[in-house]
Image (cartoon, rainbow, N blue to C red):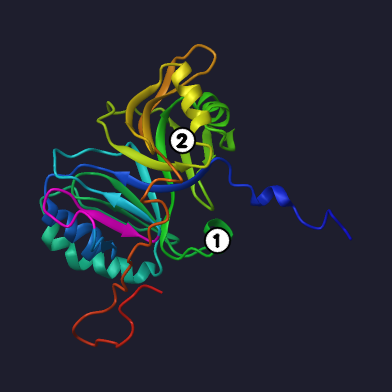
Amino acid sequence: MDHKAFDRTAEDVGNIVKLEHVNLTIPDQRLATIFYVSGLGLTRDPYVMTGIDNMWVNVGESQFHLPTREPQIFRGCIGLVVPDLAALATRLRKVSGLLEGTRFSFSEQGDHVDATCPWGNRIRCHGPDPARFGPRTLGMPYVEFDAPRGSVPAIANFYREILDAPATANEGMAVVSAGARQSLRFRETDSPLAPYDGHHMQIYLADFSGPYQRLLARKLVSRETDQHEYRFIDIVDLRDNAVKFQIEHEVRSMRHPLFGRPLVNRNPAQSNQGYMPGQDAFR
């Protein structure tokens, strides 16, 4: 038997097993519905956070969490995979009039569509691409942060040593494995960065306690939430504990009650006109 026929390391995920959600506070649930649901074609979670003080929006196996408060701005862009870029552009054109007077915009860029939410958050939408995103046709394959010049080697090292996540740093960009075909990206920029405003992302870890102990030793744990969750904000240079980037990580264990919860995703092409029986759910 040829034991070298396959590159088994290509299947390694690392300790971060899933990027589950990005949390951005927004001041107007109506405008959020127009952009995220009617425009992007995503699905409001029908079971959890169904009131007017928060909205969970499903995108494949991941989510946006959109609590009602003053707007937060993601420093970078959030990458999505959607099944049909042409249909996406059509939906965004239809809602553009409803979003006049906001920071909403979108542009078609050939192999992707760039969209900006009513408060300035940037979303980059890709079509299905098995080479880059695997079999995923709807989801959140990456989040990409704008990072200070010279910071990415230390950022990659932080994730490798503290979170036990495979990470590389090349040509001004750190890429951290955050699950099967999901990644955290940090791209260096010379542009000034806005002050961190408290938005966060949520990840699941297989080894939950090891990173906790390493973070605790450096006094980096920012919140002791409950048995299944803790949080940290500062990404530091491990040589001197100097802060290189800030983004709150909501860290959950795989024993968290919400881990693996099936998410409802709809077929955004369905309507009362031209309705197709049996085609309500996303496929």
Question: Residue under circle 2?
Answer: 186
Q: x, y (%) of residue 248?
A: 34, 32
Residue at the far right in the pictured view:
1
Is 36 drawn above or below residue 274 in the view shown?
above
Tell me where the magenta segment starts and ends, as one range.
Answer: 48-60
- Any mark on residue 134, and which? 1
- The disc, 2 or 1, on the residue closer to the chain's N-terminal end is 1
Q: Secondary structure at mark 2?
A: strand
The quadrant of the rendering that contains the N terminus is bottom right
Q: x, y (%) of residue 209?
A: 49, 31
Q: x, y (%) of residue 58?
A: 31, 59
Is residue 47 found inside the magenta-colored segment of the image?
no
Instruction: Tell me what residue is drawn at x 11 percent, y 53 percent.
Output: 52
The quadrant of the rendering that contains the C terminus is bottom left
Instruction: Tell me what residue is drawn at x 49 percent, y 24 percent.
Output: 213
Residue 192 in sight: no
Position of 27 compared to 205: left or right? left
Position of 99 compared to 154: left or right? left
Residue 123 in sight: yes
Quadrant housing residue 37: bottom left
Q: x, y (%) of residue 262?
A: 38, 62
Quadrant housing residue 260: bottom left
Q: Secondary structure at mark 1?
A: loop
